[in-house]
Amino acid sequence: MFLECVTFLTSRPTRTNLVPTNSDPLSPISATAEGKKRRRISKKNRVTISPSPVVPLLFILLQLIIIPCVFGDESQFYNEEFPRSHFRGDSDSPVFLNEWAVHVPGGLEVAQQVANNHGYLIERAIPPLDDYYLLKHRQSPRRSRRSIQHLTKRLSDDHRVLWVEQQAIKRRDKRGLHHSLYKKDAFTDPLWEKEWYLRDQRSKFDDLNVIPCWARNITGNNIVITILDDGIEHTHSDLKANYDPKASTDLNDHDPDPFPRYDPTNENKHGTRCAGEIAMRPNNGYCGVGVAFNTKIGGVRFLDGPLTDMVEAMAIGFNHKYIDIYSASWGPVDNGETLDGPGKMASQAFEKGIKEGRDGKGSIYVWASGNGGLHDDNCDCDGYAASIYTISVTSVTSKMDKPWYTEMCASIMASTFSGSLINTGVVSADLHNKCTTAHSGTSASAPIAAGIIALLLESNPELTWRDVQHLVVWTSNPEGLRKNRGWKQNAAGFWVNSRFGFGLLNAIGLVDAADSRRWRPVPKQRLCRTSYTGIPRQLRSGKEVSIEINTDACRGTYNETNFLEHVQIIIDVEHNNRGVLEITVISPAGTETSLLRGRPKDKSTDGITNWAFMSVHTWGEDPSGTWTIIIRDKGSDTNSSGVLKKATLRMYGTVNPPDHVVRAGGRRHYHAKMKDTFHQIILKPDDPLKDVNLDLAEKLFASIQLKKNRQRQRWLTELERQEEPQKDFNDFYDQVFLV
């Protein structure tokens, strides 16, 4: 029983490379109606798994005492989110495709000449990038485990080619978990009563404050949000009224329809659930109510096939002059050992969206910070969540705690609610025109944030992408989270935490602060760079290296920076055990920030190659003075060693403080009783959970479920390999798992 209760907590679907068997998803085909039908399997053929685990006596006691007290009837969570494919993705070694992305200025004619000269065919242009093309070699294999370096070199040596890269399949995780200003009864939707994260009655500090926006008729009108994921079921009764085909495409099947591929495991439910949180229509008798229920919703289907830098770039930059907000609940694998981010083309797609999106005001990118908490992962090792162009969002439980699955890092900007052991998940639309109450993980938090930002943009559509980030920093609520560890007040007066960013998003606070009668756009962004010159420096087991970078913050130049926004520390380190490294930076004003914590599972010998660790913890500070960077080798093995080869400091900010800071007297003012804010515990005084370390218990339960799911997945893979009928799977599963 207890494992069934926590199934939805541990169910984090992984982006797999399974594709429709009739075609390669990257081939230039036109999908027909019949082709779409092949992606759908009737619900009568779906497999229902009914696991009944064997657990030690200790956990049987936990099951009998703890879980019933918290959940009561576990049926509402049963098999809602099961990790059916987390371990069915690629192996650790890369798979290279017969695809070369090239940058050839001069237009299609020049690119055609290059292709002809070197034995390639031009497959397609790569939107939204200018003069980028995808080439296929006439005689190379479709896939290989090794890159074909001599072909890449020939292209690179051609003076007409500015850049070339053979495309390799990337591994990306979907970040779900595999498991009275307004009349509170105004909605008749059947699951509205279960949307606890929008109906919190404790205090304004423990609430997202969305309903006060609705009371002002701010509901997302004229805002377009696109879900970058595995597709959305736009025919769903709670989504079809808000579906926007102009904000949608399918990069897996190369057609305009992002409808997900059905399979017996409902593998591709993720995007539909993310869309439902935002855009479910009210009072229609289906599911619940979306955060921005009048917004237009679209989807880019691209996570259901081989994923390359080119595919990511096309998704991130899709119709960037039309779409306002992109919501992404995926990223590099959250396994505690991956260091990965956007490639060259995906990075340029971000920049193009920022420069050209929303009539030059910049597209808004909202990103889930990651679910690697069980593996001691760090979201500053995720180049998407740690980009200066994204708003990285993490999760909070209804008890105002850090969930077991979330990661800690200095790039998190804010938090929203999500599911955990002590509360149900998030209400949303689900595949096959159904509903769910079990959407969870940071996958559920990011769409809520995207919906809140839609409310903000409706209230003031002239906000730039940097205005939005400043408003998030200025209005997020730390008060209700103050009982958690890790809070610090930086020298500019902002309270910030590696677990929660600047606090819980505050929808009505954002809207009020952005009132067009008072808000003035933030000053132009400046970038000041400086490097450490005293290298190389040796790293040894159990020792640390401390370096100092002195800067005048480019005073007297165009890039003079006196009010900090983002800080990046670019590190280049050779090391034979990357997971033992810890990196801390101390600002001239004394704010100490952890950029990298040790990751026990990361045994890589690749070191850290020109990686930009990003922090928002010194927001608002004056960057001039001495920055201290400390790199610790925490290895207990005397063979642990390395070399610091490079350290560069990038400081993004403005010459003068923004108008809203000046009007407030130079710093943000928090609630007068912030340090003494009382948080009402949801659990009753006699609840057996009141003295239990819930974070530890959740990790324990999740670890057990993870092992069980791995075993199940191995058998499922074997069944597929042998092409045994799915109808026999229930009997097979019972024989293996039921005792």
Image: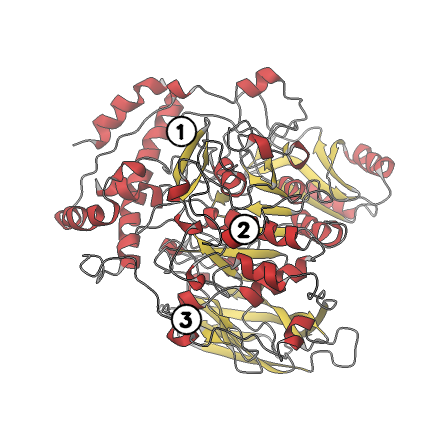
Residues 303 and 666: in front is 666
* Residue 49 image offset from top left, x and y in percent: 30, 29
Mark before the other along the chain sequence, 1 or 2: 2
Pick the quarter of the image with the N terminus: top left
Residues 478 and 696: in front is 478
Which amino acid type is shown beneath numbered disc 2? Answer: Ala
Between label 3 and label 2, give the one nearer the viewer: 2
Residues 354 and 483: in front is 483
The Cα atoms of the two marked residues, 1 and 3, are separated by: 40 Å
Which amino acid type is shown beneath numbered disc 3? Answer: Gly
Pick the quarter of the image with the C terminus: top left
Contact between marks 1 and 2 (CB within 8 A): the answer is no
* Residue 540 image offset from top left, x and y in percent: 44, 73
Which residue matches tag 2?
Answer: 215
Which residue matches tag 1?
Answer: 265
Residue 467 placement: quadrant: bottom right
Which amino acid type is shown beneath numbered disc 1? Answer: Thr
Is residue 585 placed above or below 58 in the rendered structure?
below
Quick one: label 1, few (<14), some, or many (20+) residues within 10 Å?
A: some
The Cα atoms of the two marked residues, 3 and 2, are separated by: 35 Å
Quick one: label 2, few (<14), some, or many (20+) residues within 10 Å?
A: few
Contact between marks 1 and 3 (CB within 8 A): the answer is no
Contact between marks 3 and 2 (CB within 8 A): the answer is no
The Cα atoms of the two marked residues, 1 and 2, are separated by: 40 Å
In this orientation, does residue 649 appear?
Answer: no
Which residue matches tag 3?
Answer: 486
**Which secondary structure lies at badge 2?**
helix
How many circles with numbers are drawn on the protein? 3
Image mark for residue 375: none
Mark before the other along the chain sequence, 3 or 2: 2
